[in-house]
Amino acid sequence: MTGTTGLLKSVVLAGGGTAGHVSPLLALADCLRRREPDVLITALGTAEGLEARLVPARGYDLEVVPKVPMPRRPTSDLLRLPGSMRRAVQAADDAMSAADARVVVGFGGYVSTPAYLAARRRGIPIVVHEQNARPGLANKVGARFAKHVAVTFPDTPLRGATVTGMPLRREIALLDRKARRAEALAHFGLDPQWPTVLVTGGSLGAQRINEAFHGAVSSLSAAGVQVLHVTGVGKEFDVPSAGAGAPYVVVPYADRMELAYAAADIVVARSGANTVCELTAVGLPAAYVPLPIGNGEQSLNARTVVAAGGGLLVDDADLTTEWVERTLVPLLRDASGLAEMAAAAASVGERDGDELLADLVIDAATRKV
């Protein structure tokens, strides 16, 4: 990993709309700031996405680029696309000019395509980071004329790509689960005598996961399996007193996710790219429940860790209360089996994705040829 060079003057980061794009963008920004304290970092995003709140809150400048959804079918939106794209490219171009950008890094999403086109027009080096195993349309475009293409998963079909893994928050990348376990259990009101399953569907929750575990509250407690269930805001439910059984703790949102991971022995979650990469980085086995919609990228995201033995892939329709009781409970009682799964998950994890991507960014910005 390259140390401070003082050569990286200004970088523009393009991505947003969802946490899947914003989280790695911010992780890279933090890494570049650590390595190049004087670098000017400008983010391009939409006015409607998470970046509108998260980027300024982290202390970075956000320049708004008009949202340009790419129509998947022939509709009237297709007729408006050239004009919308032209305005978005100009907005990205103006931001790059004002920042005197030396390199543009795109993470996919609505603003990345206009950012790539503006950077190409200006002759600014481009670095693409693709989070998912199946690349999105914007990054397919950007990869065609990028100086470096970085991917999270080794089987992502982008030619000439470098596998960097996912840029992660430092709280996750540096997490020592064993050292933080007692603190984590106390933070959530959990008991160290019981094995712990973390259940999460992300900040918005996942109805199928919530329903399956809601129906298993009493049986899990009686079986000696305690649960930390992150339901999503507005989706909490009441649970009966555990009595002599294992506790079942329901929270709408976990703003200290590193502590949730430190408390857990296994996780049940969707298989978004960030989730898969965080869990493998910290060596947590998981039952991955891919979203049953979209283009199947969530199943592909979990493929490597499942093949390594660090996780299970559970079809959304198969995640029922019965599955929890018949499959998950025996798994939680098998300490040696869980330890093997944890080691397998860690074997495919990458904690230094931010540093590896930063190496490519600095190289693109400073290489003379």
Image (cartoon, grey):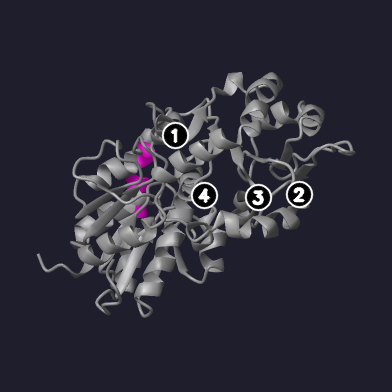
Q: Quadrant of the N terminus?
A: bottom left
Q: CA distance from mark 3 to mark 4?
A: 23 Å
Mark before the other along the chain sequence, 1 or 4: 4
- The residue sitting at 77% across, 44% down in the picture is 249
Which of discs 1 and 4 lies nearer the camera? The answer is 1
Neighbor class of circle 4 (other Cα within 10 Å; few <14, some 14-19, many 20+) is some
Judge depth for marks 2 and 1 and give the one in front: 2
- Frontmost of labels 4 and 2 is 2
Q: Position of residue 144 (x, y in %)?
A: 20, 45
Q: Residue at x 22, y 53 (%)?
A: 148
Counting from the top left corner in percent of width and height, residue 240 is at: 88, 36
Kindly tell me whether residue 18 is visible in this rendering.
Answer: no
Q: CA distance from mark 2 to mark 1?
A: 28 Å
Which amino acid is tagged 4? Answer: Ala
Question: Which residue type carries mark 3?
Answer: Ala
Circle on res. 263: 3
| First in residue order: circle 4 vs circle 2 | 4
Indicate the quadrant where residue 299 lies: top left
| N-term mark: 3 or 1 | 3
Residue beneath disc 1: 302
Q: Residue at x 60, y 39 (%)?
A: 266
Q: Is residue 88 magenta?
A: yes
Q: Earlier in the sequence, mark 3 or mark 4?
A: 4
| CB-based contact (under 8 Å), mark 3 and mark 2 | yes
Q: Which residue is mark 2?
A: 190
Dot in front, 3 or 1: 3
Residue 62 at what x, y percent from top left?
46, 65
Give residue 19's mark. Answer: 4
In the image, which residues are magenta? 79-89
